[in-house]
Amino acid sequence: MESVTGADLFISYAHADREIALKLKEDLERQGLTCWMDTHLRTGDDWEMLLEENLTFSKGVVALVTPSYEISESCRNEIRLSLNRGKRIFPVLASTLKQTPKVPLPDDHWPPHGFGFALARTQYNDFRKNWMLPSLMKDLEAYGVKKFASSRLAAEWLPATQGGEIPGVRFGSAFFNYGTQTVLYGGCTYEMFPERQDVIEHSDIFFLNNETLVWSKVAPTGKPHSSGYGCSALLCGEGKMLCIGGGNYAKSYNDVTILDFATMVWSPPTVEGSPPSTRYGHTATLVNKKVYVFGGRQGSEYFDDVHVLDISGLPQTVRWSKVETKGTAPSPRYQSTATLVGGYLLVYGGSKIDVEGEIDQDIHLLDLHKNQWTVPSAQGQAPAGRRQHSAVLVGHRVLFYGGKGKKASLGDVVIYDTQNCEWQSNFVLGGTSPPARGLVAAVQRGNQLLVFGGLTDTVVRTFEVQGKGTESQLLHLNDLSILEISTS
C-alpha cells in the first residue's frame, strides 16, 4: 500500500453512550468532516492496533464526556494516547458528572475524575441542555481541523521567550509531551582543546510548562540510564519514561531503564528475550504496548534490522524479539526518523557516512501487519537528503525540520503528504527562521512545533592539533523556537 488515509476526527466515547456518539458522528459528517469511531471494527481485527492507528492519524479527538466516560479506563487510555501523539482534544460534556462511590467529587464537577492531567485547563462544549454543534464547529475551525484535511499547510516561525532553569547548550536530547508539560532528557556537548576533546553526555531532566514556557529541573534518584545521548526516550504507560540504548562511537549500550515521574525514581525492568546489539542513533516508535526499534550504529558498524520491545509487562518486565521483515529494507543507517502513520512506520533519512557520504532521499514504509518494507513512488521534488533531523505527523502529512545534509546543516521545513505520496512543493514558510542545525530536539504541541537546542556549523574557535591539522569548536545551542502551523 502506497498511501495511508485517516479521518479528521477520532471520537472517544464510552460504550454506554454509543447512540449519542453515533448522533454526534452523523452531525459532524454532515458538516463535511470525516469521523472515526470503533463501529468500523470487524471480527478478527486487532482492535488495539486499529484504535491507536486511527487516533494517531486523526487531526483531533472529540471526547464525549459523561458519567460512564468518567469511570472508563479505556477512555482514559485514549486521552493519554492523544496527549502522547500531540493531538488537540475537544471535550463535549453530554451529561452532568455526579458524585458516586467511585468518584468522590461534588455533583457537576470538572474535570472528570482521573482526567485532570489532560482536561483540567480545557474548556468543554456544553451539550447537556442544547445540542451546541455550532459551538463545537467554531472550535474545530479555530484549530484548523477541517482545513487541515483539505488545504495545503503553511507555517510561521514565532519568537519564544523561555524562563526558569533553562537547560544548558546541548544537542541530541529527547523531547516529548507529558500532559500540559514537555519533557527534555539528556543530550550531549563537547569541548575541543588542542590536547583533548571533552565529550559530556547529559542525564539531566527538565520540564517545560507549555503555557508559560518556564523550565524546571528535576532530580530523580536511583541509577540513571546508561547514556543520555544517542538513546531513545519516550513516554509509555502512565507517567513513565522508557529509555533504550544510546552512547557514542567509543561505547554503546542496549539496556532498558524506566523513570517513574510519580516517584522520580530510576529502575531497570527485568529484560527477557534476545536484546539487539548495543547501538546509538537508532529510532524507537511506540505502537500500543510495543516499541519498534530500527537501525542505529555501533562503532563503525551500522544496522538495518528491526526489533520489538514488548512493554505490556511493565513495570516489572519487558521482552525483546527480532522482526523478520520482507521486502527491501532501508540501507544500514543511523540518525534517521521513524514516524507512525496509520499501520506503517515511515522511515526517512539517516546515513552510513559521517562526513560527506550520499544520504538516502527515499521514503521507506514498514507495514506493521505484514512486516513488509516498500518504497512508495513519491511525486514532486524530493528535498536534500538528511540525517540528524526531526519529524512530526500533522494530520496525514509528515513535517521534517533541519538536520545535517551532505556537507552542511539544514534549517528548512519540508512536508511529505502520505495520502498522495507527494512532496509538497508550494509550502509557505514565514517568520525569521532559527539557525540551521542538526541533532535538534523537536516535539509537536497542538498546531505548533517546539524546537530546542542542537548543533550548528558555526565555528566558535579553531586551533592546530599536532598530527591532525586544524580542529574547530562548533556552536551549541539552547534556544527555544516555535513553528506555528496553519493553512494557506
Image: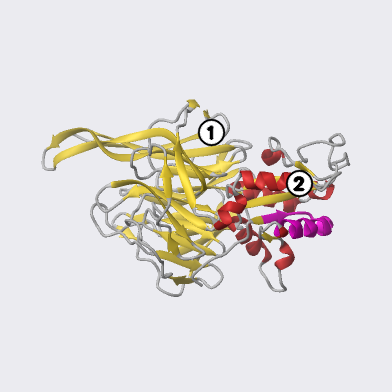
Is-magenta flag for residue 175? no
- Asked if one can make out residue 223 in the rendered structure from this viewpoint, the answer is no
Residue 337, compared with residue 182, is above or below; it is below
Q: In this view, does 46 lie to the left or right of 305?
A: right
Residue 470 shows in the view: yes
Q: In this view, does 357 lie to the left or right of 109?
A: left
Q: Which residue lies furthest to the top in this view?
A: 164
**Majority secondary structure of magenta residues:** helix
Which is nearer the eye, 240 or 337? Answer: 337
Of the residues shown, which amino acid type is indicated by label 2?
Val
Mark 2 neighbour density, 10 Å: few (under 14) some (14–19) many (20 or more): many
Residue drawn 76% across and 50% down?
64
> In the image, what residue occupies the spot 14% across and 37% down?
465
Q: What is the image's colouring?
A: secondary structure
Residue 14 belongs to the span the image colors magenta = yes
Per the rendered image, the range of residues in magenta is: 10-29
Residue 139 in picture, x, y percent from top left:
67, 44
Q: How crowded is mark 1: few (under 14 residues within 10 Å), some or many (20 or more)?
A: many
Image x and y of residue 250, in percent? 30, 48
Q: Where is residue 204 in the image (x, y as percent from the top left)?
A: 46, 34
* Closer to the eye: label 1 or 2: 2
The residue that label 1 is drawn on is 208
> In the figure, is residue 199 to the left or right of 92?
left
* Secondary structure beneath label 1: strand
Determine which residue is flagged by label 2. Answer: 92
Q: Is mark 2 on a helix, strand or loop?
A: strand
Callout 1 amino acid: Leu
